[in-house]
Amino acid sequence: MSNSLAILYSDEAVKDFGSTLRRALRMEEIQDYASLIELENAEKDEDFAEAIKKFLRRYESHASRLHLRRPTEESLEKLMKLVSDYGVRLVRAALISHALVKATKEDE
């Protein structure tokens, strides 16, 4: 199990979505706590996919106007593959953990 966690926490897709969620939570213009709650409540693959879809839709509404970096399509595909390989609970924990850690200067 710990090897699985190490793989998930170091995965680029998890990092990409985690930093995007961090921006969505911390930027005054966005403050998307709804996505955090929906992700936290996702139990099945379908719930997780729906939460990610809603998150991306909310984020996109601000990304163009604020010139924010978006997650890549490859990251989305990899994230959903991780969910099918490792399960929602582990991927969700890694994603939210990345979102809630202190950002580096580069991320800000």
Image (tube, rainbow, N blue to C red):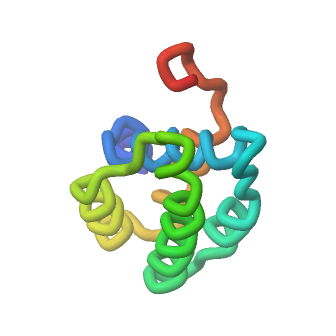
Q: Is residue 28 left or right of residue 68?
A: right
Residue 58, image x and y in percent?
59, 65
Q: Can I make out residue 4 in this image? A: no
Residue 76, image x and y in percent?
32, 61
State the residue lying farthest toward the top: 105
How many numbered marks appear? 0
Give the residue drawn at x 47%, y 51%. Answer: 64
Give the residue drawn at x 40%, y 48%. Answer: 70
Work out whether residue 37 or residue 1 is closer to the camera in this orientation and state it: 37
Examine the rendered structure and indicate whether residue 57 appears above or below residue 94: below
Residue 73, image x and y in percent?
26, 59
Q: Can I make out residue 69 in this image? A: yes
Which quadrant holds the C terminus? top right
Residue 86, image x and y in percent?
37, 64
Work out whether residue 95 or residue 68 is closer to the camera in this orientation and state it: 68
Work out whether residue 76 or residue 5 is closer to the camera in this orientation and state it: 76
State the residue lying farthest toward the front: 65
Q: Is residue 13 left or right of residue 17?
A: left
Examine the rendered structure and indicate whether residue 18 appears above or below residue 39: above
Examine the rendered structure and indicate whether residue 54 appears above or below residue 93: below
Give the residue drawn at x 66%, y 64%. Answer: 35
Give the residue drawn at x 56%, y 74%. Answer: 54
Toward which corner of the image does residue 79 lie, by quadrant?
bottom left
State the residue lying farthest toward the left: 74
